[in-house]
Every structure is written in structure tokens, then in C-alpha cells.
Image (cartoon, rainbow, N blue to C red):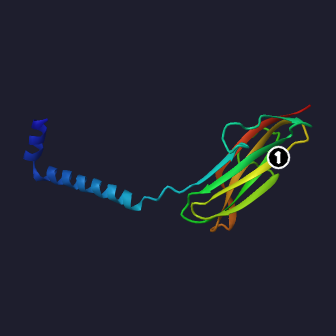
Amino acid sequence: MQKIIKQFFEGDNHTISIAIALIIAFILLIFSYIAFMKPNEFVSFSILDEQKEAKNYPELLVIGENNTCKLWIVVENHMEKSINCKVLLKITKQPIQSIPLQMEENRSYNAILNKGEKWERQVEISFNETGDFHLVFELWIYDDKTKNFEFSNNFCVLTLKVIEA
């Protein structure tokens, strides 16, 4: 190792100049990354069970006994600005090929959230028909540039079975 270091410093000035230039470029790259790095901005989106936990989701409903499920929609704004958002609930028996689902929503929930604000809403969904259902919750955020709600790529899917008593 000492031999390599000795050869480096005993070498021509051209090699030393290149090494110094590379070190300076590396340092500048690190500082520019830190200076222009965007803060970690995001919107958190979750669907929780009746106790506001992510563990006891309904899986089986029985018509005439307990054909209603209660869930919580939670949206939290971690952006550096206010957001206008909506959560679309789409209920389908069809297999899910892609999200967002290309169908009309069954329900829509709107919220305007300031920076750092959290929005929670309990929803009740009742079923009067048997089958295997997919509840798809999609988060859409208003884009000031396009003047439309845009799909945020945040979604939750719950699957449940509804049977006769």
C-alpha cells in the first residue's frame, strides 16, 4: 500500500491534478444533492377495521344477521401544500385486472386537507346479495395544472364473502 501511495505522489503532476479534480467534483456532487434534494412528500392512505386497526377486517357477512361492515378511511397529508382529494369506493364481483377500476364508483368521499392534516371517516357498507365481493378504495388528488382529479396510485382492496343465513 505504501508503495502505491509513494508512486502516486512521485508520479507526474498530471495524475495528481486529475485526482484532485475528481475529489472536488465528488464533494460538489454531494453538496448539490443535499441542497436540491426535495423533502419526502407523500399522502398516506389506509383502510382500517372498526377498531381503527389494520387487522380484523370483515371476511364473511351473512344476509339477515350481519350484512354490514364498518370501516375507517384515513388520509393524511404529508405534502408541503394543501390538497383536495376524494376516495372512490368501487364494489365489484369481477376479477380485478388493473387499478383504477374502469367503472363508476358506488360512493365518493371528499376532503380538503391542509399540510400535516389527517382526515378520518367511518363508512358502513351493507350487502343484500350473496357472492364474493371486492371493495376497491381509490385515492384521487386534484391537480391544479390539469384542473382534474388524478389517480394517486394509492388504493386498498378488501375481499369478502356474503352468504345467506
Q: Is residue 97 visible?
A: no
96 up-or-down from 35: above or below: above
Residue 138, x across and y down, in percent: 71, 51
The quadrant holding residue 159 is top right
* Residue labelled with disc 1: 125
In the picture as drawn, the residue positioned furthest to the front comes out as: 51
Using residue 100 as the reference point, say whether residue 128 is left or right of it.
Answer: right
Residue at point 49% right, 55% down?
40
Residue situated in front as seen by the camera: 70 or 37 = 70
Residue at point 61% right, 60% down?
117
Q: Secondary structure at mark 1?
A: strand
Residue situated in front as seen by the camera: 111 or 6 = 111
Residue situated in front as seen by the camera: 147 or 66 = 66
Using residue 41 as the reference point, say whether residue 142 is left or right of it.
Answer: right
Residue at point 38% right, 57% down?
33
12 up-or-down from 3: above or below: below
Q: Is the residue marked by circle 1 packed among few (<14), some (14-19), or many (20+) residues within 10 Å?
A: few
Residue 46, x across and y down, in percent: 66, 47
Residue at point 28% right, 55% down?
27
Residue 29, x across and y down, in percent: 33, 56
* Residue type of the residue flagged with mark 1: Ile
Q: How many marks?
A: 1
Q: Is residue 101 visible?
A: yes
Residue 108, x across and y down, in percent: 78, 56
Question: For the C terminus, which image quadrant?
Answer: top right
Using residue 19 as the reference point, say whether residue 136 is left or right of it.
Answer: right
In the picture as drawn, the residue positioned furthest to the left comes out as: 10
113 up-or-down from 51: above or below: below
Question: For the N terminus, which image quadrant?
Answer: top left
Residue situated in front as seen by the camera: 85 or 66 = 66
